[in-house]
Amino acid sequence: QVQLVESGGGLVQPGESLKLSCAASGRIFTINYMDWHRQAPGKQREFVAGVRRSGTTEYADSVKGRFTISTDNAWNTVYLQMSSLKPGDTAVYFCTAFGNGARSWGQGTQVTVSS
């Protein structure tokens, strides 16, 4: 089993940057894919960005070129560097870890983009 804890959310102005972190613990060696999802008020949860053990990354079209997903070498932590933030990026951001046929979710961290 894998436990995930997100941090780094907050209130920023449009155009600013923010970096989210997600610390993994437990059976980290089973993880082969980690990603970020977000859920805005009144909307469905959506995929944001993902990274595989191979290093391959993928992004939602809405964040491509503005967000960057990365991990540390030990895969203890996954990051989401967010730049040029827009009000439409306001949401609760969740990280997930997938391995051995199971997906674990963190509790989420709030990101609010507002002037």
Image (cartoon, rainbow, N blue to C red):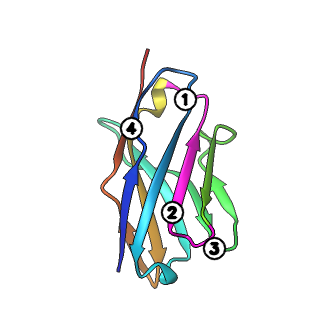
Q: Quarter of the image containing the C terminus?
A: top left
N-terminal-most mark, 4 or 1: 1
Q: Amino acid at mark 4?
A: Ala
- Report the residue marked by disc 3: 53
Q: Quarter of the image containing the N terminus?
A: bottom left
For label 1, count other residues whose C-alpha is less than 10 Å away and answer few (under 14), some (14-19) or many (20+). many
Q: Residue at x 62, y 57 (%)?
A: 70
Asked if marks 2 and 4 touch (Cβ < 8 Å), the reply is no
User: Which element is circle 3 on?
Assistant: loop
User: Which element is circle 1 on?
Assistant: loop
- Report the residue marked by disc 2: 77
Give the residue at the far top of this rendering: 115
Residue 103 horizontal/vertical position (percent): 40, 72
Asked if marks 1 and 3 touch (Cβ < 8 Å), the reply is no
User: Which element is circle 4 on?
Assistant: strand
In the image, residue 88 above or below residue 105: above
Region in magenta: 73-86
- Report the residue marked by disc 4: 91
**Mark toward the viewer: 2 or 4:** 2
Label 4 and label 1: CA atoms lie apart by 12 Å
Q: Amino acid at mark 3?
A: Arg
N-terminal-most mark, 2 or 3: 3
Q: Residue at x 46, y 85 (%)?
A: 100
In the image, residue 6 above or below residue 86: below
Asked if marks 3 and 4 touch (Cβ < 8 Å), the reply is no
Taking the magenta stretch, the answer to whether it contains residue 80 is yes
**Mark toward the viewer: 2 or 3:** 2
User: Which element is circle 2 on?
Assistant: strand
- Report the residue marked by disc 1: 85
